[in-house]
Image (cartoon, coloured by chain):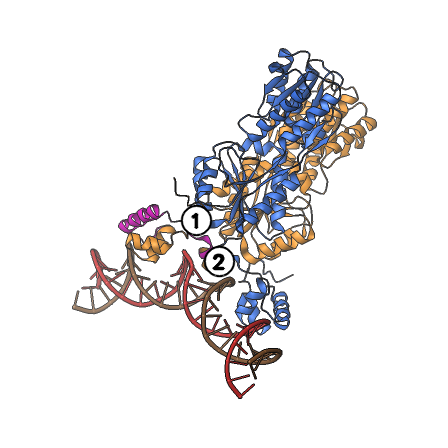
Chain colours: A blue, B orange, C red, D brown
Amino acid sequence: MTMSNAGARRRPPTIHDVAREAGVSRGTVSRVLNGGHYVSPTAQEAVNAAIKKTGYVVNRHARSLITGRSDSIGFLLTEPQERFFEDPNFNVLLRGCTQALAAHDIPLLLMLAGTEDERRRITRYITAGHVDGVLLVSSHSGDPVAEELREAGVPLVACGKPIGLGSKVSYVAADDRDGARDMVRHLLSLGRRRVGVVTGPLDTPGGVERLAGYKEVLSEAGVESDERLIVSGDYSRASGEAGAERLLAQAPDVDAVFVASDLMAQGVLAALRRAGRRVPEDVAVGGFDDSPAATAANPALTTIRQPWDRISNEMVRVLLAQIGGDDPAAVILPTELVRREST
Amino acid sequence: MTMSNAGARRRPPTIHDVAREAGVSRGTVSRVLNGGHYVSPTAQEAVNAAIKKTGYVVNRHARSLITGRSDSIGFLLTEPQERFFEDPNFNVLLRGCTQALAAHDIPLLLMLAGTEDERRRITRYITAGHVDGVLLVSSHSGDPVAEELREAGVPLVACGKPIGLGSKVSYVAADDRDGARDMVRHLLSLGRRRVGVVTGPLDTPGGVERLAGYKEVLSEAGVESDERLIVSGDYSRASGEAGAERLLAQAPDVDAVFVASDLMAQGVLAALRRAGRRVPEDVAVGGFDDSPAATAANPALTTIRQPWDRISNEMVRVLLAQIGGDDPAAVILPTELVRREST
DNA sequence: TTCTCTACTGTGAACGCTCACAGAAGCATG
DNA sequence: CATGCTTCTGTGAGCGTTCACAGTAGAGAA
């Protein structure tokens, strides 16, 4: 290692070099690269050997130039970046998508549309065809970026059911309503009857669905519904804390709380402790998400696990299918109750 | 909006269209696009108008094909993905880098090198020139991917001082040692004399430096050093909890603990509470990172803020400079003590 | 034999851009 | 008037692929 050639970065071998090495034409090498149809076994083998020998890697720019595909996809986060970036689920989703795409040898471009300037830049970038499709995280309604992309015909898969976008948009979501139902049924099965709820933001489908599930089970079970048992939050820890305080004030006899996110549930636990209520003896608390916050909480949270790994895999699968010409699709995945110490 | 042309995705305008529209040649348009030197104001104006009118966006593939640059950079996370993905700092860093790059109109490709297969794929992708440079998050020593990239002459900027890589690698880091010094000085200033430490992983520079800062201040202050006051962790919450238990067993008279991460500090707080020690009355606790965990903790953590926004900006700045031909550089940024309730 | 069909291979063109070069025009200088 | 310099512009070549097409060889059928 005396000769420092670091920083040299000589031009990598081209398809031409491989063809010469293998004693075939560019066309044959290209065919081998793209599936290997109509290539004799002999040529196939020679080309593969030549690729290995030369260390050839296809130049994606050249390929994209002619195919019109970019062979890359965008992961787009619009709107409330703070919320998502603090949400551990976001990490799991991002990681899952990256890995699922990596398996297809497709790079993921991270796009954050915060400022108006960024929105414009990103929209232009995407509509110019620099990505083949977009994984969208934007549970808010009326997202202008998403709307614009949809109109431009960019293949789009949202995480969670998008509000306000037409049916042309695919989405993958956990079954929020069913998860909520499971949790509330679980609380009822413990003998609790004054079951409160701290909802998520009601301009998001998740927030709406979880509340709907709560109401459904109560009415099914014939439990008297009580508006004082319903308070709303925005998924943040602080809003959970505030929500629990309101709940305790409005309905002091509350004996269980279904909280629409683990982060909020942490806040609820803190408020309950301050109020001198024991968990789960006096008040049972159920969360939603099964985020790290759930196990970190004291007591550890009973919660609803969203299948994030499956969600990310499905998002990628649906997006690639749609890029391949399939129609938009909606995928709803089942959730799972995880029982811990708080119920 | 009755005619649904969604899904049409007609070919976008090319530089040719712009040239025709503006009544100039391709070359002139290209010059306007790339800085506008040697272009008459008249032509300049005509081209800009034509660009706006046609909605032209440069085809990056075509450009890259000829320039050899990709005008995109990779954000590479190697090794212990779990740790980083649970670490809120990682989010802040990722977001900061993405935004800093967006300001230069450079997309960020997220690359996760988990499995051996992924490592190979990523290395091949990068060395093939599909990104111009790499932002590296890998505090572990002897990272084979990083080493390979360095040898291939790929511009590289690490977050945190990399162990085992030569001086050819740039890095940006917070001043861990100085931050640790500040915290321990703060604890001493409160009159504490039996100051324990829960270190980070000692195969990372951060872990080593923070411990070094602790030792320095104690010896400066003439406080008797005691090996029983030193226990090691791995930045995880659980290791903090276990560390505090060991600490209490080895040195029951401990009256302050410097914990090398907020996440671990949460664990320390839990262990202290269980042991019946009040914080900060009996034991003062200082964290490191100023992550969301710090404010979420009960009591809220006094901690050392790392300037993550500046770190990400500097990483991008240094990387772009290096791609532009500058020599590798090391940047150390100052930290800040944030006092809350735990001291 | 001759024709058709299949399996395979090579060739040129094109994708949209940048870059080097040639050349024009304007102006000052010898 | 020639010469040089500066500022500006257009042109052709070429980046590394894929794709359509033409063409070859061999097998089987007529």
Residue B332 location, x and y as percent?
Answer: 58, 39
Q: Nearer the viewer, mark 2 or mark 1?
A: 1
Q: Can residue B194 be seen here?
A: no
Instruction: State the residue in front, B244 or A155.
Output: A155
Q: Quadrant of the N terminus of chain A?
A: bottom right
| Same subunit, tags 2 and 1 | no
Instruction: State the residue in front, A214 or A122.
Output: A214
Q: Is residue A133 magenta?
A: no
Q: Main secondary structure of the magenta part?
A: helix
Residue found at the far right of this picture: B249
Residue D30 location, x and y as percent?
Answer: 55, 80
Q: Is residue B95 left or right of residue B188?
A: left
Whether A38 is drawn above or below A133: the answer is below
Q: Which mark is residue B8?
A: 1
Amino acid type indicated by mark 1: Ala
Q: Is residue B53 left or right of residue A14?
A: left
Residue D29 location, x and y as percent?
Answer: 59, 78
Q: Is residue B43 magenta?
A: yes
Instruction: Give, as a single range, the part of the protein colored magenta.
Output: B36-62
Amino acid type indicated by mark 2: Thr
Q: CA distance from mark 2 to mark 1?
A: 16 Å
Q: Chain of mark 1?
A: B
Q: Which mark is residue B252?
A: none
Q: Which mark is residue A67?
A: 2
Q: Chain of mark 2?
A: A
Whether B124 is drawn above or below B291: the answer is below
Whether B235 is drawn above or below B11: the answer is above
Tell me if label 2 and label 1 are in contact, CB under 8 Å.
no
Q: Quadrant of residue B259?
A: top right
Q: Quadrant of the C terminus of chain A?
A: top right
Q: Is residue A278 left or right of residue B11?
A: right
